[in-house]
Image: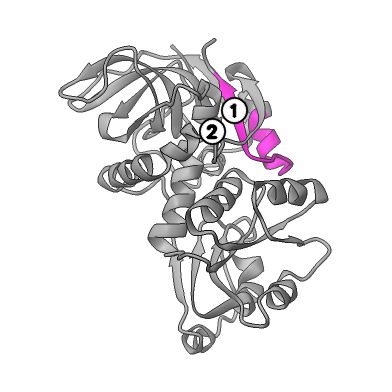
Amino acid sequence: MKSVIVKKPGGYDQLEVVDMDIPKLKEGELLIKVYSTSVNRTDIITREGKVGYLKNPILGVEVSGIVTEKCGESSFSIGDRVMGLVNGGGYAEFAIIQSDRAIKIPDSLSFDEAAAIPEVFLTAYQTLFWLGKLKKHETVLIHAAASGVGTAAIQLARHISDAKIIVTAGSKRKLDFCRELGADVLINYKEQSFDEEVLKATNGEGVDVILDFVGADYWNKNLASIKKEGRWVLIGILGGAEVEKVNLLSIMSKCIQFTGTLLTPRSDEYKALLTKEFSENIIPYFENKKIKAIIDTKFSLEDIGKAHLHMESNNNIGKIIINVCE
């Protein structure tokens, strides 16, 4: 089967399409003929050698496709259309997924749309509700709001919590799209000081929840933007991983809950529980089209380097899809 591996840690030019054996199933697993997968930030940092997927040399953490084999008891049948998170191996013609992490694709969704859902929507659901504990009518600040997770988070915050949604992005095009998805307050971080705009929009109180993809560069402004007893969830470090001269008393005095998280390294059991709850609570919103998968561009498996470069250029709105099989 065609598969994408990394020749050695480095840039997008280190990605290579090679021929590998179809993986063998173990108890509780499904073999998926992959129709679509997608590019995620975790793929970029794995390619660079900063993290790894256990023992799987093939990149890719999510797939959509058709069940071709199964091992053990499962609620899925051969021929079912499914999507979900995998432990690496998504950039290939066949991939293994644990049965309890597979989600049946609604009939109304294409394989491309399905591949745009698992990683970003499960991440957004986890960070907003499991970790951020976003409640009805609270206020949330979402950074990198036009990204895959950002566009998912806007929709979930709107339809599940009816929250007041404040977003940051770096262009009018991105902010206009965020407004269409349900954002209330739009901040261009290149032209405005977002902490000042947040305080204006909240009568000086700050927000209840921050979904932060940036990290170090936004530390002080996030601290100024969060409400007393607010919940701050760190999900990315696009702006650096090290913060100098942190005053811990400033965190204590606001009684802030600060949580760092990544979804990919979580246990299989954690991902299974998250998938189950998400499937029960959110998939119906896709079926009635209140929530939608956001696709930016599509590439072939052979153009995987161009797809990674496109993500690194930071111009995408929503997901970058890789078409594996026609």
> Magenta segment: does it hold 303?
no
Identify which amino acid the numbered label 2 is placed on.
Ala
Identified at 75% across, 52% down, the residue is: 175
Magenta part of the protein: which range?
307-323
For disc 2, the neighbor class at 10 Å (few under 14, some 14 to 19, many from 20) is: many
Task: From the image, tell me which residue sits under label 2.
Answer: 116
Vertical position of residue 314 compared to residue 145: above or below: above
| Location of residue 221 by image quarter | bottom right
Q: Is residue 171 visible?
A: yes
Q: Which residue is mark 1?
A: 321
> x, y percentage for residue 13?
65, 29
Q: Earlier in the sequence, mark 2 or mark 1?
A: 2
Q: Secondary structure at mark 1?
A: strand
Residue drawn 72% across the image and 45% down it? 177
* Image quadrant in which you'd find residue 297: top right
Of residues 297 and 284, which is closer to you in this image? 284
Marks 2 and 1 close (CB-CB < 8 Å) = yes
Mark 1 crowdedness (10 Å alpha carbons): few <14, some 14-19, many ≥20: many
Whole-angstrom CA distance, mark 2 to mark 1, is 7 Å
The quarter of the displayed image where residue 223 is located: bottom right
Amino acid under label 1? Ile
- Label 2 sits on a secondary structure element that is loop
Any part of residue 7 in sight:
no
